[in-house]
Amino acid sequence: MYKKNVLRPRKANRRLVALTLILITSSLGGVVAPSPSSAAEEPNGNRTLVLAQAGDCQPNCEGRLEPKYQPREPEEKSWFNGAYVFGLSRSLAASTIASPAKAPLFLFTVPLDIALFPFSLIGGMFG
C-alpha cells in the first residue's frame, strides 16, 4: 500500500525556520549594526579618542604623541653568517612536523650537513 512520506514535514519546518530567521535579521539590521552616520552624530565620540591617545602628555608636547619606548640601535653587521652551518638540521628542528616523524629524518639531515659543512662555512662568509 501507500507509504506516507515522513520527511516532507521536516523540510517544510526547516524552510519556515530559515525564512523566519531571514525576516528577523533583515528587520533588526539597523539596530544590530549602527551606521557610521549615527556614530558621527555623537558629540563626544571624537573627544574620547583624543583624550585616550593623549594619556600622559605634558603641557608642552603641543598635541604630539611621544613613543612609549626608545628604539634600539641597529646591530653592526657581522663578517660571518652562521645560518648556513647545519641549516638542514636546524630547519628540520624548527619545522612543524610531528616529533616521531622528525627522528628518522635527522638520520638523513645530519650526514648531509656534515658533508656540506665546508660549503656552508664558505657561504657564511659571503652571505
Image (cartoon, rainbow, N blue to C red):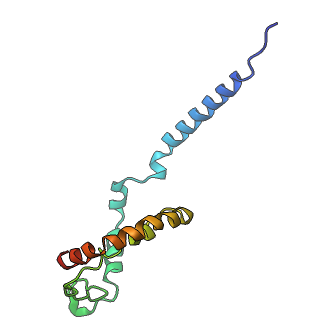
Q: How many marks?
A: 0
Position of the C terminus, as image quadrant, is bottom left
Q: Quick check: 120 above or below 12?
A: below
The residue positioned 34% from the left and 85% from the top of the image is: 55
Q: Quick check: 72 above or below 97?
A: below
The residue positioned 71% from the left and 23% from the top of the image is: 7
Q: What is the quadrant of residue 75 in the picture?
A: bottom left
Q: Quick check: 53 above or below 105?
A: below
| Residue 27 rendering spot, x and y as whole percentages | 50, 41
- Extreme right residue here? 1
- Extreme top residue here? 1
| Residue 119 rendering spot, x and y as whole percentages | 25, 72
Q: Can residue 18 be seen in this view?
A: yes
Position of the N terminus, as image quadrant, is top right
Q: What is the quadrant of residue 90 in the picture?
A: bottom left
The residue positioned 57% from the left and 39% from the top of the image is: 21
| Residue 28 rendering spot, x and y as whole percentages | 50, 45
The residue positioned 49% from the left and 62% from the top of the image is: 97
| Residue 35 rendering spot, x and y as whole percentages | 38, 53
Q: Is residue 88 visible?
A: no
Q: Is 120 left, or right, of 19 in this rendering?
A: left
Q: Is 4 left, or right, of 14 in this rendering?
A: right
Between residue 122 and residue 18, name the one nearer to us: 122
